[in-house]
Image (cartoon, helix red, strand yellow):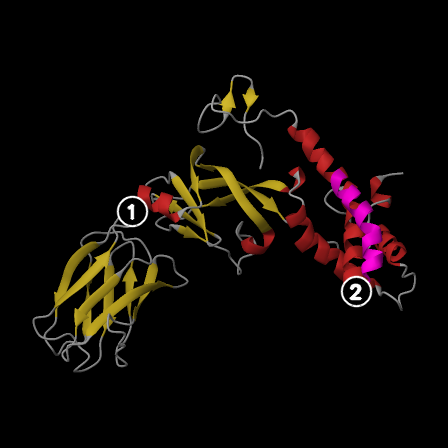
Amino acid sequence: MPDNTLSTLEQIRTKVRRLTRSPSTAQLSTSDIDSYVNNFILYDFPETLRTFDLRTKLTFFTSPYVDTYRTNTINPYDPLYNFKNTYTTVHPPAYIAGYQVMFSQSREQFYNAYPNLNNTELVGTGDGVTQIFAGTLTAKPVVPGEVSFTTIAVNGTKIAFVDTQDVDPATGELLPTGTLDQDILPGLGAGTINYVTGAWQFITSPTPECPAAATPIYCQAVPYVAARPMSILYFEDKFIVRPIPDMPYRVELEAYIRPTELLNATDEPMLSQWWQYIAYGAAKKVFEDRMDMDSLQLIIPEYKHQERLINRKILVQQSNERVSTIFTEQGNGITGGGWGGGLF
């Protein structure tokens, strides 16, 4: 009998009813069973078992002058669409344009190699009257999220504008922010900064919120030279690359994907072998909600047995792989005898 007749959602429903002694929909509705099944698949399964079958290649492309790539909730065709909910974890090796690059989850390690060193530039001088200031930075392009303009108002209060990225990754909005003494001038306007061309503008309000006469206006920013990225930082569910790219490059990493939920009676798990484990997991959740601890303890041994059966495949799969040692080639773990290093 083929798998597609033994491991469907309909078979899982039947198994859950038998395990929970709920043959009637009045005792446990089909929609409730589906909810328990999919809750177990989406949230419990991927955290309990990191199976070989859930490991996949994650591919996306960089954009020129853009250093940060995060979850996209607008374009479903974007590889990073709903990234935080689609993937559970991300792992090396990482490749950019086919070259293996450094993959880090440590800001300290990453920014020690690529520090955000501020360049301070005098961009203007206040006269006590002018409210609109504009110009172009000499050192450009500049790193998004690292730009600030500071000066002192007529009444001696400090003025500070910092950049906040909007929808367009090439242009940031300059917004007034708290000063060193935590004052925020209510009359300050806003401005913009083009990270690529260096063109900027901001608006202050009439006296006393405009820069005082003969008061310098400084910009602090982090200029860079665009090139092919050689390192990638994964932090706060975002990918940050350095150097910042000068053109689109293919980025490839490895990631664990969540199992696919089951919506229709004929739907099957990603691997047919999982169906009994899913059924026991769903039944376990039913008993937990019913506070039926005696019945829960009765199914735990078989639940664990099914878990071991799934893990058995992983162990056999990995038994052909050598464990990484000090003698394996550093960087990619390749030796003369084959691939080194485990998957976990």
In this view, the residue farthest toward the left is: 214
Nearest to N terminus: mark 2 or mark 1: 1
Task: Give residue 129's position: percent from left, percent from top.
Answer: 12, 79
Residue 291 shown in magenta:
yes
Q: Amino acid at mark 1?
A: Pro
Q: Is residue 266 visible to the viewer in this orientation of the structure? A: no
Please name whichever residue, 261 or 337, is drawn nearer the observer in this view of the structure: 337
User: Is 166 on the left-hand or right-hand side of 40?
Assistant: left
SS category of the residue bearing label 2: loop
Q: Which residue is mark 2?
A: 291
Q: Position of residue 311 (x, y in %)?
A: 71, 38
Quadrant where the C terminus sits is: top right
The reply to whether residue 43 is visible in this rendering is: yes
At mark 1, the secondary structure is loop
> Pointer 1: residues within 10 angstroms few (<14), some, or many (20+)?
few
Identity of the amino acid at label 2?
A: Met
Q: Which residue is mark 1?
A: 115
Q: Position of residue 92 (x, y in %)?
A: 50, 38
**Residue under the point 64% across and 30% down:** 318
Q: Main secondary structure of the magenta part?
A: helix
Q: Is residue 297 shown in magenta?
A: yes
Is residue 74 rendered to the left or right of residue 227? right
> Which residues lie in the magenta part?
290-308
Q: Nearer the viewer, mark 2 or mark 1?
A: 2
Q: Residue at x 24, y 52 (%)?
A: 140
Residue 5 occupies quadrant: top right
Distance in Å between CA atoms under marks 2 and 1: 54 Å
Pick out the residue farthest to the right. Answer: 23
